Image (spheres, rainbow, N blue to C red):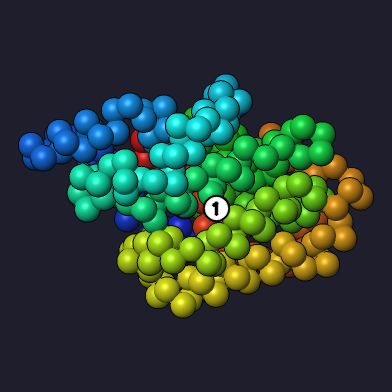
Amino acid sequence: MKFSTHLLTLVAATTAVLSYNIPVKREDDKCESEIKDYKPCVDLILVPFSSENINASCKTLATEQCQKFFTDIEEIAPSCIDNKKYDYLSKGYVKQYAAQNKYMCVMDENNKLCPITDLNINLIFNKNAKPSVSEINNQSDKASEETCYSKKCTDALAEYYKTLSEDEDIIKMMAKSKAYNLNADDFKKDAQDSYKFFTNSDCTKKAGTRAPKVYSENASTSEASNIYVKMSSMAMLTLSVLYLLY
């Protein structure tokens, strides 16, 4: 199973989300009414993090209002849950967005962006970059390896994959998505494998031996390395590719 295959199918699958700004049926008005007071929280899903907004976005994510929104979406917006126009507000999607944004708000020991967050902001979310699939794959693998040099970044990323492997709402959502062409068991196994990678001593022993290198600093990692983390280049880019379509 190659990441490039998943990425290509993911791009096709996420085009459906573009319906967000298209008014369709009258019952959508009820959904809009339910989420209107939570616009800053909804924007965390729809607006990509950037170097300009990440600090403000992370502060917004930490507010009591948004913590409640991401935890109690079914209670707050029941009219949105089964509305295809608002697929991004299904319980599984919202939980995944919250988990990824939580990771992206973690800084390393030098108060700098973690490698994958830096890559997302400066390459994946950057509309001017227009990266190729091979470049995304290559840089994602490098960022995953560099993550191991920061305990804070590694722990946060391991927690993300632990959430993916254990949260049934996320697993069911991913299994139904055409983005992965995986059943629930396969998706869960990939998440578990990635969790094991970031908690394995081969990764954790690197923490603190040097500062992690990041994409924005034009860093390069060893070309001799053959480490390939399936989910690190897949699950963490679920939203990244989605943002490219806006």
Q: Could you tell me residue 154's position as x and y percent?
A: 73, 53
Element assignment for label 1: helix
Image check: 106 left or right of 121? right
Give whichever of 121, 155 is nearer the camera: 155
Image check: 56 left or right of 6? right
Residue 187 visible in the shown view: yes
Residue at the (87%, 60%) spot, across then down: 205
Q: Could you tell me residue 235's position as x and y percent?
A: 52, 57
Note whether 116 is above or below 59 in the view shown.
Answer: below
Residue at the (39%, 46%) spot, across then down: 72
Residue beneath disc 1: 236
Residue 239 visible in the shown view: no
The kind of residue tagged 1 is: Met
Q: Residue furthest left?
A: 26
Residue at the (77%, 32%) spot, across then down: 111
Quadrant, the C terminus = top left
Q: Residue furthest bottom?
A: 185
Give whichever of 225, 177 is nearer the camera: 177
Note whether 56 is above or below 196 in the view shown.
Answer: above
Q: Could you tell me residue 100's position as x and y percent?
A: 54, 47
Query: Badge 1: few (under 14), some or many (20 or more) residues near its Cα, within 10 Å?
Result: many
Q: Could you tell me residue 218's position as x and y percent?
A: 73, 37
Residue at the (38%, 66%) spot, across then down: 172
The tally of labels here is 1
Note whether 184 is above or below 49 in the view shown.
Answer: below
Image check: 34 left or right of 112? left
Image check: 193 left or right of 243? right
